[in-house]
Amino acid sequence: MIFKDKLEGHRSQPDELPAPAELNSELDEALDNFRLSIHAWSEAAFSRPRTVVAALAPRRVWRLAVGWALGCVLLVGGASAGLWEYQQWEMRSASARVAEQQRLVAQQRNQLARQAEQQRLDEDLLAKVDRDVSREVPSAMEPLAQLMAEGDTP
Amino acid sequence: MAAATVLERMTMATAEEIAAEEFSSVVAKHRPRIFRFLLASTRDMDLAETLTQECFLKAHRNWRSFRGESSVITWLMRIAINLQKDHWRNRRMQFWRQTQSNAVALDEASEWLPSGERSVEQQLLARERVGQVSKAVEGLSERQRTVFLLRYVEEAELSEIARATGLSEGTVKAHLSRAVARVRAELGGKR
């Protein structure tokens, strides 16, 4: 292709066309200026600093996705384990509370039973004492007691 | 037998290295021109850069099939023109707003005119004229604009334009003639 290397200078003219040289000078100059402005603009745009964003390779994308998935699994697993542990702890403490209550109730019952037994024993002892005491006769009353015993015999 | 295979492999590797080096030099040489043409066509730096990269990517893929029937720059220009066409055809609606926002205003584009040794008045007048030409170019059809830019910005011969665009030389002349008439009218009307 015979694209011209130099930016400046006259353009080659096709024979059949109303070539730029045959156009009025104003048009010719405007077209020249247009070309120069496009060239200058392009050069400036071409040499401007660019920020390059590296495209992620498919393998890296996969690795990233797997990493994220593993991370999510670990997060969910950790949260679930924590929740499960908390529930277990709740259940353990609830059963401990129930057992403690049952123990207290049983203790109370035993205490009550022991108290009742003690009371009964005390009452029995007192009754026995009363009986024993009532059967004993003072020595001053001994002759009268013998008389009553003889009078009873037929 | 084994020695021949090794030799073949070495030859292939060397050929690939040579091709890669050749292509690197092609990129270094022609990238600014392709970018310039796409920038002038789209007036969008980001889009021009993207299309330039796509152009060279496509060229790299087809580098082996390039048989030198035309010059490298003509071949690259043809790829660039087709990419640009495809872009506008496929993504006109999706990218319309973005392109509108990224596109440089005509006045701003004319600011790049080198001042040279002109007076301030001359500079202002030249900028105004460049703005008028830009406006006229913007109003051209896609094909007319491509032909106009290849002719008056890239300074290509008609035969090269015909090869790059896939049009006949007669059609190129017709498009160019209409484009120039439009620019002339724009300049004449604003006097």
Image (spheres, rainbow, N blue to C red):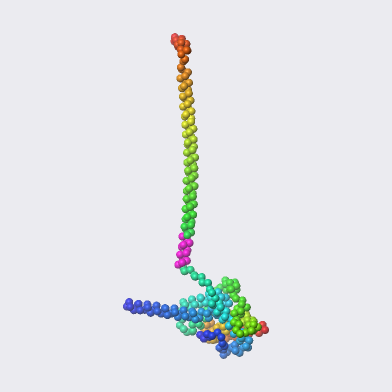
Which residue: 49% across, 44% down? A94
Q: Quadrant of residue B96?
A: bottom right
B125 horizontally vs A6: left or right: right
B121 horizontally vs A127: left or right: right
Is the C terminus of chain A in the top left, top right, bottom left or bottom right quadrant? top left
Whether residue A27 is situated above or below residue A139 in the rendered picture = below
Q: Do we see residue B87 in this rendering?
A: no
Q: Which residues are magenta?
A: A59-70
- Main secondary structure found in the magenta portion: helix
Rendering coords of residue A2 (x, y %): 52, 86
Which residue: 54% across, 77% down? A47
Task: Answer whether residue B40 is magenta in the image.
Answer: no
Whether residue B125 is situated above or below residue A111 in the rendered picture = below
Q: Do we see residue A143 in this rendering?
A: yes
Q: Nearer the viewer, residue A110 or B42?
A: A110
Rendering coords of residue B182 (x, y %): 62, 83
A17 horizontally vs A80: left or right: right
Q: Farthest left residue?
A: B1
Rendering coords of residue A99 (x, y %): 47, 41
Task: Answer whether residue A65 is magenta in the image.
Answer: yes
The mark tally for this picture is 0
Q: Nearer the viewer, residue A106 or A22?
A: A106
Rendering coords of residue A27 (x, y %): 62, 86
